[in-house]
Image (spheres, rainbow, N blue to C red):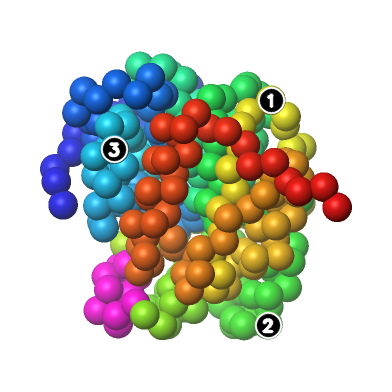
Amino acid sequence: MHGGDQTARGSPASGPARLEVISRSGGGVDHGSPPLLFVHGGWHGAWCWEYRGFLDRVAQKGLDVHALSLRGHGASAGHDRLRMTRVRDYVDDLEEATTGLRAPPVIIGHSMGGFVTQKLMERRRLPGVVLLASAPPFGVARLLCKLLHIDPLGLLRVHLTLRLRPMVATPDRVRRLFFSASMSDAEVDLFASKMGDEAFLAYLDLLFLDLCKPAKGTPVRVMGAEKDEIFSVATTKRIAAAYGVESTIFPDMAHDMMLERGWESVADAIADWVIGGCRPQAATPI
């Protein structure tokens, strides 16, 4: 794992916020491709793209890559105000991060980060978007029902405390939500220790307060994981249908596709799509 630059940028939303951005250079190879900006999901931070060398692998294809920690996550500021943070604040962070790059980026949004990316698409067109195990534009009500079934005590604590940390409070909970059986206990323990809290109001936004209207005009690639316990293959296919494209499902992977065994194939698929010009995979007519 190589060292990388970490920079702090300001965000105008809800006062200035210092944002962690981890960057890797493509080494001067000129594909004529835009930079890539990776945005994590709930409870995570930019660290999730760095741990396995995901950023390095994409950069080795000659692409400039950057990973953002949204406010209240990773090394970004705003942890003390996280409970009151809304999805629109995350969208402001993402938009601000794009302004510091050499050109408008292709954005890769994982899980909640995919939802945030779709909200940014409502504001502006982008060179391309990859929705990776993404939250759907139509909200997470089905996920709430699933969590009520698999972890009713954790969900009860979430609503009693107005904090989402109880859902990832133990390694067992982290494994159940994010990882397949192939992940070692030691690594699950490590990743569980890196998980932070998540914004309760942002959770309500994803549930019903601020859903997405699928925006046209941006090339979209939709990727999902066969064994995802958070957003199922069926949900991923519905997301793809909302954007008029086909989905790509990676076998034997769980939700955290950048950390799961086989992550290299995900990194390569993203890089190859960008180098190939971000051509949409059109849905097959029925």
CA–CA distance between discs 2 and 1?
38 Å
Q: Position of residue 86 (x, y in %)?
A: 60, 41
Q: Which residue is mark 1?
A: 217
- Magenta span: 183-193
Q: Amino acid at mark 3?
A: Lys
Q: Residues within 10 Å of mark 3 (few under 14, many from 20)?
A: some
Q: Position of residue 39 (x, y in %)?
A: 45, 42
Where 167 falls versus 172 (above or below)?
Answer: above
Q: Which mark is residue 149?
A: 2
Position of 148 with respect to 73 (left or right) is: right
- Precedes in sequence: disc 3 or disc 2: 3
| Element under disc 1 | loop
**Is the C-beta separation of discs 3 and 1 under 8 Å?**
no
Where 210 falls versus 157 (above or below)?
Answer: above
Q: Residue 33 lies in what quarter of the image? A: top left
Residue 184 on the magenta segment: yes
| Element under disc 3 | loop
Residue 111 visible somewhere in the drawing: yes
Q: Position of residue 210 (x, y in %)?
A: 73, 42
Q: Which residue is mark 3?
A: 61
Residue 74 on the magenta segment: no
Q: Which mark is residue 115?
A: none
Q: Give me the residue at 26% from left, 58% from top.
A: 52
- Most common SS among magenta residues: helix
